[in-house]
Image: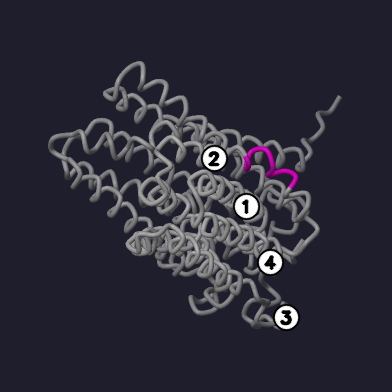
Amino acid sequence: MPRTSVDPVALRRRSVNRIVVLHGLSSFCYGMVFPFIGIHLASLPAVGTTGVAVYYGVSGLANLAVSLLLASAALRVPRHALGILGLLLWVGCFLLLAGGGTLAGTAAAAVLGGAGQGCFMAAIIPIVNSLVPPEERRRVFARRYQVLNATLAGGSLVAGLFLTVFSGRAITWLLLANAVGYLPVALALALARRVPAVPENTEGAENTESTEGTGRAEGSLGVGLLVRASLGAALFQFGAYLFGYSQFEATAPLVADRLMDTGIGWVSVMLTLNVVVIVTLQRPVTKLLEKRPEEQGLRIAVALWVAGLAAAGVTAFGPGPLRLTGLLLYAMLFALGECAYSCSFHPWLISRVPERELTRANALCNSMMGIGMFFGPSIGVMLIGTGQAAWVWLPLAGLCGIVALTTVRRRPRTAAPAALTQPAEHDPVPVG
């Protein structure tokens, strides 16, 4: 009896599930090390706190440089190869961190780590998109975000228990485990390369794979047109990380500890509560928003972030228990905003650019994310200088609200530049 061919829909679904699960595994491994990298480097006599600053500074610059090279088409690599390259660079980074003890080795690890992030982050969204039909995008991207948050938090918890038992010297073993954790993801991307793309994206994917790697591809968008097509998404990403994510991750713990007298323990509770809300409510929020335009989902995300900052600001005028309540409410509302963001942002970006240019557009947004994360904490530190928690939270609420303006449509989709809709090229996927 002849063997029947495998259903391509089943192949794509299996490939996406494999990528999400193995990416979650690598996120768990990274969760075991990311809170302790600075501690590890600072404990090395030849590295110290100077090396910590060098590592994060050089890593950020390398990420930005690679992202801009990819966005400008000065560097063109097929998306699967680009993702695998990024993962292998990450492997090299953490092997150097585990085995090195010099400032030069730390700087080299930072270059590999930053470049790896620039490559992988630019590639992973186009790869997942090529395997997902438009009607399933929001659910898949939301599930990916949910898995990554849960595994990252789980890895941090396990590492904390591990280091409590085996002391800080065991961080070296966690760094090695993290390096190994990237290899299964590389295998998943290599296997995904053989899976046929969804029918709507097949032409664009073929064009990208066959033309990238030798300078500017025939028919590819110039930098100006690419920026014009993805400007709103890039500006939203910049604002979201400048006034949103960087403030939650860097400024909020400082304000809680120095200006609100909550103590380090409550900072941990705040971060844990944030993850718990994302893990438990991501699916209901995605279901609620999947019939709405992506722009509306992003405006809801910003509104929730603003509400959280405003709640923390207003309650900061009250007594200690009220201030603590406001801080925890901020963590919960920010998490709900993250749920809305995760199921809306990348589908919105995908709808704005031709599929063949998605890697470049995603690299541009990644560069804006890096810039926002770099400058965001300095804004928070400047506001902390006022000495009043309320005058940190309330100005941030106003600044964060401005981000919603980036989702306003400047022109109807049908009036897109002709260069984006040439007959021989792949058109942008309409909003689901």
The residue drawn where x is 57% and y is 67% is: 233
Tell which of 278 and 273 is nearer to you. Answer: 273
Question: Which x, y percent locates residue 417?
Answer: 64, 82
Q: Nearer the viewer, mark 1 or mark 2?
A: 1
How far apart in space, not on screen, are marks 3 and 2 (Cα)? 38 Å
Quadrant (top left/top right/bottom left/bottom right) for the N terminus: top right
How far apart in space, not on screen, are marks 1 and 3 (Cα)? 24 Å
Q: Which of the two labelled residues, at mark 1 and mark 3, occupies the earlier sequence position?
A: 1
Q: Which residue is mark 4?
A: 295
Q: Which residue is mark 2?
A: 190
The single residue placed furthest to the front in the displayed view is 319
Q: Quadrant of residue 251?
A: bottom left
Q: Quadrant of residue 278?
A: top right
How far apart in space, not on screen, are marks 1 and 2 (Cα)? 25 Å
The residue drawn where x is 20% and y is 33% is: 43
Main SS, magenta residues: helix
Identify the element where label 3 is drawn.
Answer: loop
Q: How many marks?
A: 4
Q: Which residue is mark 1?
A: 342
- Magenta span contains residue 36: no
- Label 3 packing within 10 angstroms: few (<14), some (14-19), many (20+): few
Q: Which of the two labelled residues, at mark 2 and mark 4, occupies the earlier sequence position?
A: 2
Q: What is the three-letter code of the residue carrying label 4?
A: Glu
